[in-house]
Image: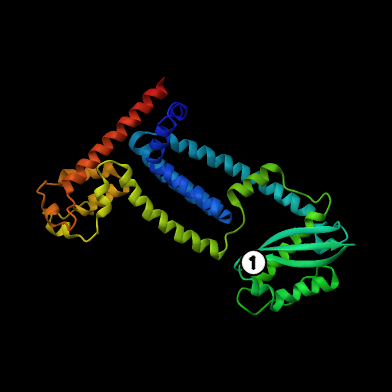
Amino acid sequence: MTWSRLWADPLGFLWDAVRIRGVRLTLYLLIAAALFPSSRSILAVVLCLLLAIAWTRDFRRRGSTKIYYLIAALCVLAAGYVLARQDVLRVEALRAGKSPWNAGIELVSDGTYTGEGQGFRGPIRVHVTVQDHRITALDTVAYPDAISVKDNEVAQFAAQVFRTGRLERPTERGMFRGTGATLTGYMNAVESALVKGIPGYPQYSLPSRVLLAALIGTPPDRVTLNALAILFAVFIVFEYALQSMLTPGTGRSINCYNCATCVGACPIKEVEGVLMPMGLVLLTRLGDYERVKELSKYCVGCGRCAAKCPIGNSGPLVIAAAFRASREQRREQEALKEKEAF
């Protein structure tokens, strides 16, 4: 697959791209990052680990130099993170003197501002109205657990702000589970709204904002982590099926029940820690055709597995499909090297 095909044959380029597992895993992570922005730091680490494992294996097997590109990218990101951190510390020091908690509402211009904070059960969004250097309205626009901001300490804080027109930190925290996190998120939402009305409020530099938003973001909450766990399971199941469907001849590996009936019928049963021939079927499903080729020398081709398998899977047929897939991959890689040489 070469980039020149993107213009000459876009459909063919896309077909070749989705047949590469690394490309598909990257797409999965990008989808998750778009759905859950607060999880981008975790997804960035996962992507780097997956690329490191895959490209290290390619380096050992074929001498591929892609791992060096990953190392260079990580070095650039590390340098960017150091610079962004210095910028954040500098800006936070400047903000301390203009914070609504320290300087009061006197610096905030009249108007209605929207702010967000992270509560116990998700993001909190509020509208804050300021008039004559007083908070005249404080409305909760969105929160997954709205009842928790209408009762207990959160409601008391909101009532106090509305009554005094100023920000004062509460002296006592709630006793209910999650009240403390919700109260902190609510206060952060009010603060983020008010700072929008302060002229000349210090801001991070553009490179720092891009790095923080694209890779780091905000710490993920419990809801995001639970959703990621479910999404990960869905991706794994989908990927197992997709790998075999995209590779001609290996689709039969999807039907394996993992019942090990073929293992009982096979005269070999196990070699190098792999159950035969069920292990070959699972390796084919994973796309590890080279490993299937390495283990194929132990298969005697008796066909007992196909006779006993409830769906008719055959070790020799799976091996033959893996050989064809491996041969096709090698041809594509050789063609790519030839084009790169020119």
Task: From the image, tell me which residue sits under label 1.
Answer: 143
- The residue lying at 11 percent from left, 46 percent from top is 301
- The residue lying at 16 percent from left, 56 percent from top is 309
Position above or below: 334 against 176: above
Q: Name the image quarter holding the N terminus.
A: top left
- Examine the rendering and report whether any part of residue 170 can be seen: no
- How many residues crowd mark 1 within 10 Å: few (<14), some (14–19), many (20+)? many
Q: Residue furthest top?
A: 342
Q: Is 86 left, or right, of 178 in this rendering?
A: right
Identify which amino acid the numbered label 1 is placed on.
Tyr
Position above or below: 62 against 281: above
Q: Name the image quarter holding the C terminus.
A: top left
x, y (%) of residue 326?
27, 37
Most foreground residue, 341 or 196: 196
x, y (%) of residue 211?
62, 45
- Examine the rendering and report whether any part of residue 293 can be seen: yes
Most foreground residue, 2 or 98: 2
Image coloring type:
rainbow
Most foreground residue, 74 or 247: 247
